[in-house]
Image (tube, helix red, strand yellow):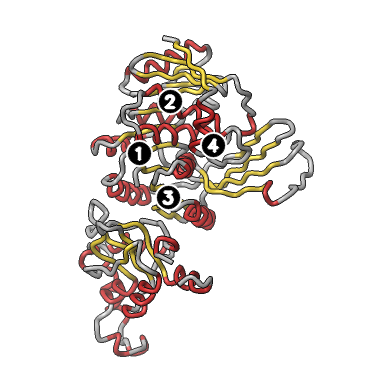
Amino acid sequence: MRVYDVMVRDVTAVTQEDSVENVVRIMATQFLSGVPVVTEDMRVIGFVSESDIIRAAIPGYFSLLQSTTFIPDMSQFLKMAAKLRDKPVREIMTHPPLVVNENASLAHVADLMIKHNVKILPVVDEHGRLLGVITRTNIVRAAMEGYL
Amino acid sequence: MKVITVTLNPALDREFIIEGFAVNAYHRIKTQDHMVMNPGGKGINVSMALAKLGVSSIAIGIIGGYTGRVLLTELNKTSPLISTSFVHIEEETRENIVIVDPVNHTMTSINSPGPRVDKKAVELLLKRYEIYLSRAEAVVLSGSLPQGLTGEIYGKMAKMAREKGRMVFFDMIDEYLTEALEICVPDVVKPDVRGSYTILQQRLESLEDYVEAAANLVKRGCKLVVVSYEIKNDVVATQDGVWLISTEEKVEPENILGAGDAYVAAMVYKRLTDRNTSMLETAKFGYAAALAKTKKLTKEMPEYDEIGEALNSCKLERLR
């Protein structure tokens, strides 16, 4: 089975000049864990995920602490999160993005997702233009039906 | 994606087929296939009809709440030729209810007004629209507007499309059409005269009123104008004249749901696939699609062959 057979043909995307606030709004209202970043002709040039946003709002060493109970002052986090709101997406997006072609096999996509620990990937055509997305659930569902 | 369809006030359509429907009575629906739930709103319907004709489109607009998510899930299942990108808001997308009675030949519709849309949602939509315009050949702007929006939005979107050299199709009520035309004139317009029976605020009563109104829109710059006249006839105006398209076939009023959208989709198809075809032939193909749709009880869009068959029963009469 190919990506084409199970992908979600939703081409919701942002440009690299969009604000992080807009991205968070899209993610919150559409229950997405990430959004593709595209050029004016819809070529995917980046991807912004929950992890990208959290990483940008929290100092790097916090991830080593494993627990928020070690954070002495939440106000620093809140200040950084507030500053992030108006920043353009290009400052925090993953670039170049990980993308898959619509003709790729599901086994290949599953392998990519496991290796890079991602939940969602943009699907593109032969020119790198956005066609939709594929999620872990799409693949698990196909696997359960014996189609991987 | 060849076409962008814009549905600013989509609806989750619920169709119930009830034989002998009456108000103030208890009805039990016979079987599951007598109750159909599908994504609706004029633009979405056009996308579904285009998919039947093998044309890819992107359906965009504004949806909200739980109903909006159900609508989107259903739409994403419809066809691989339909892509989507809707701005999500909190207020619920509306539900439209249609009760079809094949015994008494009636169709009872209950349409809700839809949610209130804020400025931010519109801004987000316009940004996306601008991106998608880079890849589309035509844009369909049709249907009702949610609370908080006026026909100005259609004018703005048409202008953006025309500036990029895209074909623009309008299918909307006179209130929006009047406002939109102040900003931009589309290539093809099919005014929705149901209820108001006005075009550019001029009352339509006689056939001559319809002819005059259609000809006036051509004078304003439209290349093709189609106005529905007494259910199964259409007044068609182009730069070459005005015609009446009709049929001798019987059209059941309970089957007309979605016929106007099949009409628009077929005109888009014709313009995209055969640039040399005349505007009159484009309208005739649209009429045949609408006629083919009326052979189906539910909102199922016609196949190409069914349209071809219906073309044989279309009659053309020159009026001007």
Q: What residue is disc 1 on? A: B139
Mark 4, residues whose alpha carbon is within 10 Å: few (<14), some, or many (≥20)?
A: many
Instruction: Report if residue B91 is visible in the image.
Output: no
Q: CA distance from mark 1 to mark 3?
A: 14 Å
Q: CA distance from mark 3 to mark 2?
A: 24 Å
CB atoms at circles 1 and 2 under 8 Å apart?
Answer: no
B195 left or right of B167 in image: right
Image quadrant holding the C terminus of chain B, namely top left
Q: What residue is disc 2 on? A: B283
Amino acid marked by disc 4: Gly
Amino acid marked by disc 2: Ala
Residues A38 and B205: in front is A38
> Do marks 3 and 2 share a subunit?
yes
- Residue at the right extreme, as displayed: B26
CB atoms at circles 3 and 4 under 8 Å apart?
Answer: no
CB atoms at circles 1 and 4 under 8 Å apart?
Answer: no
Name the residue located 49 percent from the left edge and 31 percent from the top edge. Answer: B308
Q: What residue is disc 4 on? A: B258
Name the residue located 77 percent from the left edge and 47 percent from the top edge. Answer: B28
Name the residue located 39 percent from the left edge and 35 percent from the top edge. Answer: B268
B99 left or right of A77 in image: right
Please tell me whether mark 3 sits on a helix, a strand or a loop: strand
Q: What residue is disc 3 on? A: B82
Figure check: B111 above or below A78? above
Of the two numbered discs 1 and 3 in the rendering, the one whose residue sits closer to the viewer: 3
Q: Quadrant of residue A66?
A: bottom left
